[in-house]
Image (tube, helix red, strand yellow):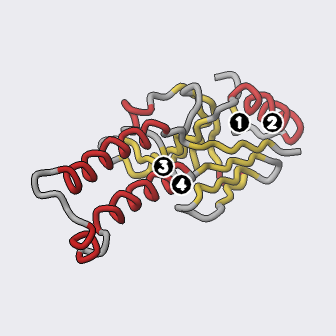
Amino acid sequence: MEYKEKQKLNLWWLYILFGIQAIIILSITFLGDTGVSLEELKEIYYLPILGVILIFALAYFINQNYLLLVVNETGITYKYWPFSRTRTIVWDEIDNAYFRKFDALGEYGGWGFRYRLWFKWNDRAFIFDGDSIGLQVVLKNGKKLLFSSANSTNLRQYLEALKQKHQLIMINTDV
């Protein structure tokens, strides 16, 4: 019995922003007063076209990252692909785990893997699409992790069942 959730950033607007930038770059390159001919384009090794392709490849790479969150009897396992490997926090390392409402921009400055604003390095967050309710985990060494949840009601129900089955006193689901 385990709870598994995979979250991705939905950055569709990034393609629109980069598309506008690509139109500007290509129109200046080919339609300007000193438009580039095919021979000149070959001499500069198709650099403007490669630059535009690189921009869209970067947008694709950014949109492919995801957070995999698995909660089970042993603890909380998470992986933020492609930036980190799979990590597991066992229940003995956790001092407190509870749900809380958060403000992604106001508290952490955005979405994705973030540190809390104002140089609070012990407070990290994995914020993706969701309803601004997440699982706050406070470790015994003082570090904090926040995991956003796209389906916080199912996660809350699973943690409640896990708390009753294994008598885990560090889980607070009635917050």
Residue plotted at (36% across, 38% down) = 109
- Element at badge 1? strand
**Gap between marks 1 and 4 measured at Cα:** 17 Å
**Gap between marks 3 and 4 measured at Cα:** 20 Å
Label number found at residue 163: 2
Amino acid at the residue labelled 3: Phe
- Element at badge 4? loop
Which residue lies under the disc numbered 4? Answer: 141
Q: Answer whether labels 1 and 4 touch (C-beta < 8 Å).
A: no
Up-down: is 25 above or below 100?
Answer: below
**Gap between marks 3 and 1 measured at Cα:** 23 Å
Quick check: 38 left or right of 138? left
Amino acid at the residue labelled 1: Ile
Amino acid at the residue labelled 2: Lys
Asked if residue 88 shows in the view, the reply is yes
Q: Which residue of the protein is positioned furthest toward the top in this rendering?
A: 174
Circle nearer the N terminus (3, 1): 3
Tell me residue 120's x, y (percent).
36, 46
Mark 3 or mark 1, whichever is nearer to me: 3
Q: Answer whether labels 2 and 1 touch (C-beta < 8 Å).
A: yes
